[in-house]
Image: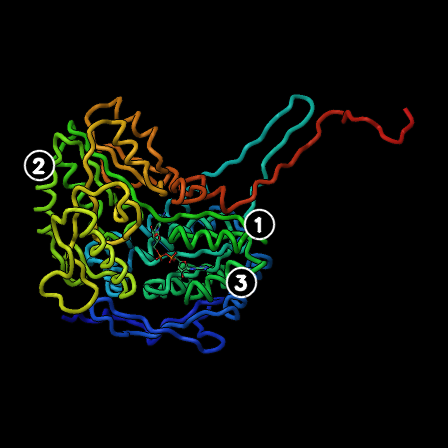
Amino acid sequence: MTQEKPAGLPDKIRHFIDGKDVDSVGGEEFEVLNPVTNETYIMAASGQKADIDLAVAAAKRAFEEGPWPKMRPRERSRILHKVADIVESRDEQLAQFESFDSGLPITQAKGQARRAAENFRFFADLIVAQHDDTFKVPGVQINYVNRKPIGVAGLITPWNTPFMLESWKLGPALATGNTVVLKPAEFTPLSASLWGEIFREAGVPDGVFNLVGGFGESAGDSLVKHPDVPLISFTGESRTGQIIFGNSAPFLKGLSMELGGKSPAVIFDDADLDTALDATVFGVFSLNGERCTAGSRILVQRGIYDEFVERYAERTKNIVVGLPSDPKTEVGAIVHPEHYEKVMSYVEIGKSEGRLIAGGGRPEGFPEGNFVAPTAFADVAPDARIFQEEIFGPVVAITPFDTEEEALELANNTKYGLAAYIWTSDLKRAHNFAHAVEAGMVWLNSNNLRDLRTPFGGVKASGLGHEGGYRSIDFYTDQQAVHITLGTAHFPRFGAGN
Ligand code: NAD
């Protein structure tokens, strides 16, 4: 089973430092695999400390000597809108790169390019509308906030929807006048290789955007430990977040962390069952299940449990698994053989922890590559590993409950707290449950639909801090308080002898 390489592939994926595409100083490279065949289809420069040092030096120079941080918001905004225009105009190529490299179905990769452009537009508009506080103490003081960019921001991103998630950090970091070093995920470096050209074409000055590819343990680690990088915005696994938190501690860096999840979708027996079914199938199997906010634990009230499980099984079995490039495909190939092994190991664990109602291994007709049949387990106990641990693939655990109290206990019974989806037609119950559930984001009678103004992030092991809207602006800026005395200053005169 093969699919054609997308048109316009570079000969190699390189770093982008100070406006130029460059190899690693020491020439290090790594192999990038096609998830459909697991054959190497391109080589990528593998960043080491020396490469991070060069990128940070360029970003520091651009911050201290270049025009970017001093530009009027409108000027930066115009450039960032141009970035969005270019991203949109390359929608087709981006989608093809993303789909080929990550195994995402092509139809879903297309949505990612549009969302990436929107992330730039949103923050480009926000900084023009940005205003800061002034406080008056009548006759005594006027105090105001002098907001300023912080410096070189280190951005570390994962492989699921990589281009879109990179834009989620690049948009606000650049809009606020910082310069950046991006370290994209090693499993999916292809789409990120387009950024350099996009920024150059849009008129972003050299050194403002830098990218160093490679592994977390080398490139990522060097970025986190670089003393000239005061901010790290990280999205990835909770375990990696803990390591980065520890490594940042000696430098007291500003940290924003968007981490793992095991989000509950809670369906009460008064819910609109047809819509809840559509949403919970899409909520866990879209993006190949490689989705931080996937509703991967479905909790269903006893009265509708049997019917729900039966219908869910039927729908799951009908999901179209196929080549990522095929527009009919609903679930493509898992990103990388390492991750495929992890997902498959949970499929096996699940067989002794729950009742297999759909999938359970490789889909028929896919003897090679990282294909997993959409898999659902029913009757899963809360202490099961497939209930507690993030699988990050097309695998779901379904568990019954009797009362609202029991549903809440089950929903909160994991270390994670990213998202929650509640399905009920009882208004009071919906809000009370939403307020009590331990999740950074809640959707009532809806799938994950984002409003970029709202806070995005998790509680417990799912994250640290929130980004989104003005919270992103706050993370990427310092708010200096400037105090002006209006009247006569009154304070004790030490040493004046009275
Ligand atoms: P990961 O933690 O393995 O890697 C993420 C990034 O961190 C990669 O670029 C990697 O190279 C880098 N990295 C790894 N070790 C590092 C180290 N010691 N120092 C510095 N950088 C290091 O995560 P992943 O497997 O790429 O992504 C999947 C995870 O991301 C899942 O847990 C998922 O839930 C989470 N995620 C969360 C959100 C969110 O918004 N909360 C969004 C998407 C993905």
Q: Nearer the viewer, residue 442 or 90?
A: 442
Question: Sequence-wise, which precedes: disc 3 or disc 2?
Answer: 3
Q: Is residue 87 shown to the viewer in this render? A: no
Distance from disc 1 to disc 3, alpha carbons, whole Å, reads 18 Å
Q: Is residue 119 shown to the viewer in this render? A: yes
Q: Amino acid at mark 3?
A: Val
**Residue appearing at x 10%, y 37% in the figure:** 306
Residue 5 location in percent, x, y? Answer: 22, 71
Question: Sequence-wise, which precedes: disc 1 or disc 3?
Answer: 3
The crowd level at tag 2 (other Cα within 10 Å; few <14, some 14-19, many 20+) is few
- Secondary structure, mark 3, is helix
**Residue appearing at x 64%, y 36% in the figure:** 482
Residue 267 location in percent, x, y? Answer: 19, 33
The crowd level at tag 3 (other Cα within 10 Å; few <14, some 14-19, many 20+) is many
Q: Which residue is mark 1?
A: 252
Badge 1 residue CB within 8 Å of ligand 1: no
Q: Amino acid at mark 2?
A: Glu
Is residue 159 positioned above or below 434 on the image? below
Q: Which residue is mark 2?
A: 307
Which part of the image, by quadrant, shows the N terminus?
A: bottom left
Is residue 418 positioned above or below 1 on the image? above
Q: Nearer the viewer, residue 111 or 247?
A: 247
Question: Sequence-wise, which precedes: disc 1 or disc 2?
Answer: 1
Which part of the image, by quadrant, shows the C terminus?
A: top right
* The residue positioned farthest toward the right in the image shown: 497
